[in-house]
Structures are given as structure tokens and as C-alpha cells.
Image: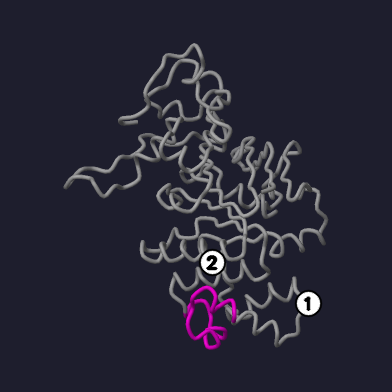
Amino acid sequence: MGKLLEVKNLQVSYNTYAGEVRSVRGITFDVNEGETVAIVGESGCGKSVTAKAIMGLIQTPPGEIKKESEILYKGENILNFNEKQWINYRGGECSIIFQDALTALNPTMKVGKQIAENIAAHRSMSREEVKKEAIKLIQMVGIANAEKRFNQYPHEFSGGMRQRIMIAIALACNPKLLVADEPTTALDVTIQAQILELIMNLQKRLGTSVIMITHDLGVVADIAQRIVVMYSGKIVESGTSDEIFYNPKHPYTWALLKAVPRLDLKNKEELTAIEGAPPDLIAPPEGCAFSTRCKYCMKICLKEAPQKTDFEETHRAYCWRYHPKAPRIEMGGDI
């Protein structure tokens, strides 16, 4: 199983009136062929900015991808693509499902035409063949009366149905890589489960690699083979799903796991929350970004950024607590 996507030292900033916002600060990860990788973290940690960078959707200005950054797709740096290569890459090789289908879909255009546009842009087909393929995609994502739905507008669909249309658009050209940017955020729990099951089934059938972006670790428990945990524009821990869920190493990962609602909570028992707020990325902290919210913080955590510690071939974390000279702790309890 070869590497389909390699993100190396990705740095993305936004130049605002208040100063430079360093949204993504040197992250590195990869995605293998046919694999699902989840990127998790609180709102504002850089997940969606990473997704937009992979899709080439960082608007410049005010956005800027630093020169040291590399995003390799099948070994080729997409940041050096010309306009023709971008057209072939977006929609054809790599597609995205946005988190808010109502704003992502064109409200003045019938959904069938929106699906057909993507097919026509990347596949040599007659108008009639394009329409048939669009109707087939509407059926594939589980929408009944596909021919009737083809001629309807986004406002005539429910939230879950609109998200299915977004998936149909994303899969119109059988992309090798699918980026799902919090595709279930605005949906109720039942519809969330249906959408996630749909993405999983389609991924298995088509062999597509998936990057699942979410703030909810519970969402990715049964979906992702590997999980990347982001905080304040950096990766703080990465590993297989089993390693992250059953042997978390970073205090922030533990805090996220503690914050997931549990069925075994006693009556009126309060949910666990992570106290404090993420740091200001206009002036990021010199040390560990999580230090001001961390129960295990030491003096060095406030002064210097932690180095990487490898636990297994696939499992690594960035925390001073694993330095040979640091006192040993058993991570757990309240954060």
C-alpha cells in the first residue's frame, strides 16, 4: 500500500489588520492508498485550513502557504501545479465534502446540474450520458426518486439529503482522495450515522482514500485506520485508532477522549470539559501550546516546544513528559 498523499512541514498564515495569524505551523503526515486518516481537534486548531491547502483553496491574499511547505500527491508537489494541472486535480483526482452543504451548494441551480457540471468537466461524455451518470450518483448516495430530485433546488432537500448531494458531487469522477471536512456537523445523531456509513461503504466500494476532519473523536472510532490530533496549528499526537483510543500519550488527546459523552455516566453527572481556551495564533506561545490548560505542565513546557517522542513505528507524540529526565506520570483522571 503506497503513499498517495504526503504533507511535509505545511505552514499556512493569514495576514490580517491585527497581524499574521499562523493557522498551521509546520505539520507533517501522510495518507496511504485506500486508507482513512482522521484529523481531530477543537475548532480553530487548523483542521479546515489544512483541508483547503490540500485542495488548493487557500485564497491569496490574505492567505499564504509558506515556501518551505510541500504537499506531494503521487510524489508531485501540488503547490507547483499550473492552472491545467489544478483543473485535473480538483474534482478529478481529489474532491472535498464541505461541512455546510446549504452554503456550499448553489441555491439558484438545480442539484442535478451541479453534479453534472463536475462530470462534464472531467469526463468525455455526451449531455445525455452526463445526465444518466448524475442520476445514477443520486441513487448511489441513497436518495429515492432520483430523476425527480435531479430537477430540484437545494432548498427542497433536508439537511441530510443536501449532504448526500455534496457526496455525489465529490464522487462524480471517482477521485483517488476524498477530503471530508466535518461532513456531519449540522446534522442530528441519526443522520450523522447514516452519512458516515455511506462514506464508509462508498470508500470500500471505490477504494478511495479519505481524510476525515472532525472535532469529535467519537465520530471516527469505527472509520479511521489512523488518527492525527491537532492543537493550535500543530500535530500533538498521531497513531493508529487503537493506539489513540487505548493508549493515548498526549494530555490533549486524553482531554478530548474524556470530553466524549459516555453512556455509563450516572444521572445528573456533569460532562467533562477542557478548561481554558486555545492560544492566540497571532502570538503563539514559545513552548507547548497546551501548557496553560495542562494539568501536567512543567516549567520547560512554558519555554520550549516539545520534541517528538516515538512509542511505536506508527505512534508518536510531542510532550516534555516523555523526556528521560522528566518525572514519570500515569496519565489519566481529570485534565
Q: Position of residue 137 (x, y in %)?
A: 59, 76
CA distance for labels 2 and 1:
29 Å
Q: Residues within 10 Å of mark 2 (few under 14, many from 20)?
A: few
Which mark sits nearer the N-terminus, 2 or 1? 2
Task: Tell how many labels.
Answer: 2
Q: Nearer the viewer, residue 118 or 29?
A: 29
Q: Amino acid at mark 1?
A: Ser
In this picture, is 197 found above or below 44? below
Quadrant location, the C terminus? top left
Q: Picture quarter containing residue 15?
A: top right
Quickly name the residue at label 2.
Answer: 103
Identity of the residue furthest to the front in this view: 1
Identify the residue at the far top of this view: 325
Depth check: give the residue in front, 115 or 100.
115
**96 part of magenta stretch:** no
Q: Where in the figure is residue 111, as x and y percent of width and height? A: 58, 78
What is the secondary structure assignment of the residue under circle 1? loop
Q: Amino acid at mark 2?
A: Thr
Instruction: Say whether residue 208 is left or right of residue 229.
Output: right
| Marker disc for residue 124 | 1
How crowded is the residue under tag 1: few (<14 C-alpha within 10 Å), some, or many (20+)? few
Residue at the spot x=73%, y=50% of the render?
73
In the rendered image, residue 212, in percent from the top left (x then y), is placed at 53, 53
- What is the span of residues highlighted in magenta in the rendered image? 136-156
From the viewer's perspective, is 187 left or right of 264? right
Q: Residue at x 61, y 70 (%)?
A: 169
Locate residue 93: give its quadrant: bottom right
Q: Is residue 243 above or below residue 47?
A: above
